[in-house]
Amino acid sequence: MTVTGFEQHFGSPAQGESSAPGRVNLIGEFTDYNEGWVLPCALEFRCRAHWRRRPDNKIVVVSQEYPGERDEFDGNAPYQQGSLPWANYVRAVVAASQTTGYPMGGIDLLLHSNVPQGRGLSSSAALEVAVLGALASAFDWPLETTEIARLGQLAENQFIGCQCGIMDQLVSAAAEPGSALLLDCQSLETTAIGIPEQWTLVVLDSNHPRQLVDSEYNDRRRDCELACRIIGVNSLRAATPAQLEAYRSEMTTSQFLRAKHVIEENQRVQASAEALANGRLTDLAQLLGEGHRSLADQFEVTVAATDALVAIAKAALGDRVAARQTGGGFGGAVICLCHHDDVETLVTAVHQEYGARTGLEATVFSSRAGAGLELVSYD
């Protein structure tokens, strides 16, 4: 995107740019809203928000991904859903920002994103963080990365209606290039863990029609919350396998299985962070494999397409690849970590076998770990 594109839409040049990345989660699925640990990293795909202040209180937003569509609303009015689904995320971010008490004025926004949508790579979090960065820059808000992440999460939880945790927004805001981010979702403490330079992130997009079905996602969150009440802990972070087993008879099958996944997944995250820090790909391969099986059997969010991609990757490279479904599930993408020299073998196997197994064609993205929120002023 260029500043010229902004001027074509709004008649004046942009004053600045805010950009934020999509993310891929190496391991730690559904642990974030249970106050556990996650191990994501940013991708090189980004959402960019070019902005210019207006003399009124209007928020005017257009997107290069949705030509001909335009949304306008009062930035100081209570949240009201509009007719454009993509623009409702901007409305939600503005509504979340109103809770800070920071002054809000008018702004023109031109959005452009190359983060694949609906693939478990957090295109919505990238948009939220990019828009928050633009608002903070335009109106001189003193927002720290953690506050940006909390506001993005609030936008999702309170206004979009998806009860996500804070992982997506925080890694989009705070990621360090070349590193994964070990995130404690209770304290929000982060530790950057470098990814060996000879390893490549390969994202296998299943192209299985995916919608993060809010009812399914929220049902699983409720199962976790009810399991906490039964055990008598504030979050599943504080629960042990022994406690879970002791209260098994008081839980439904789904409550037990969801909680079992989260408790064991927290242990896998810690072990995976250590394996990554020490460059032990074989150990990481085993841990991600266990995580994928747990997503399939205990959290029940994988589909035949993502299961097939993991199986193809393992058949092609064995313990030389760490692979599992990533994101909210019900389709989406598989993340693979492997040596540069093995990428061609992996991609060839996927192209040769995936279509025959599923009738679908996978899209393959290779990426390094990217940077978090970046702000540029043109003045």
Image (cartoon, rainbow, N blue to C red):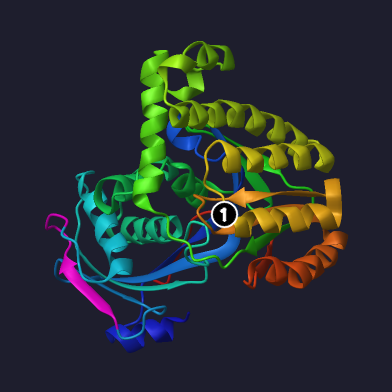
In the rendered image, the vertical position of residue 105 relative to residue 233, given as above or below: below
Q: Indicate left or right for 23 with 93 as reference.
A: right
Give the number of callouts.
1
Q: Which residue is mark 1?
A: 303
Q: Residue at x 36, y 84 (%)?
A: 67
Question: Which residue is pictured at 65% across the width and 53% down the height?
Answer: 307
In the rendered image of this protein, does residue 31 appear above or below residue 333? above
Q: Quadrant of the C terminus?
A: bottom left
Left or right? Give the position of 5 relative to 175.
left
| Corner quadrant of residue 266 | top right
Q: Residues within 10 Å of mark 1 (few under 14, many from 20)?
A: some
Q: Is residue 264 left or right of residue 54?
A: right
Q: Is residue 318 visible?
A: yes
Q: Residue furthest left?
A: 77
The local secondary structure at tag 1 comes to loop
Rendered location of residue 344, percent (x, y): 83, 67
Range covered by the magenta-colored residues: 69-79
Residue under the image location 46 percent in, 81 percent down: 2
Quarter occupied by residue 153 = top left
What's the residue at 59%, 58% (across, down)?
333
Instruction: Check disc 1 and give the amino acid type.
Output: Val
Residue 101 percent location from the top left of the image: 19, 45
In reply to whether residue 71 is colored magenta, the answer given is: yes
Of 261 and 320, which appears nearest the observer? 261
Q: Is residue 368 visible?
A: no
Dividing the picture into quarters, in which one does residue 355 lie?
Answer: bottom right
- Give the percent coordinates (x, y) of residue 171: 52, 47
In the foreground, 323 or 90: 323
Provide residue 189's location: percent of width, then percent of height.
52, 31
Q: Which residue is nearer to you in this view: 190 or 339? A: 339
Q: Is residue 77 magenta?
A: yes
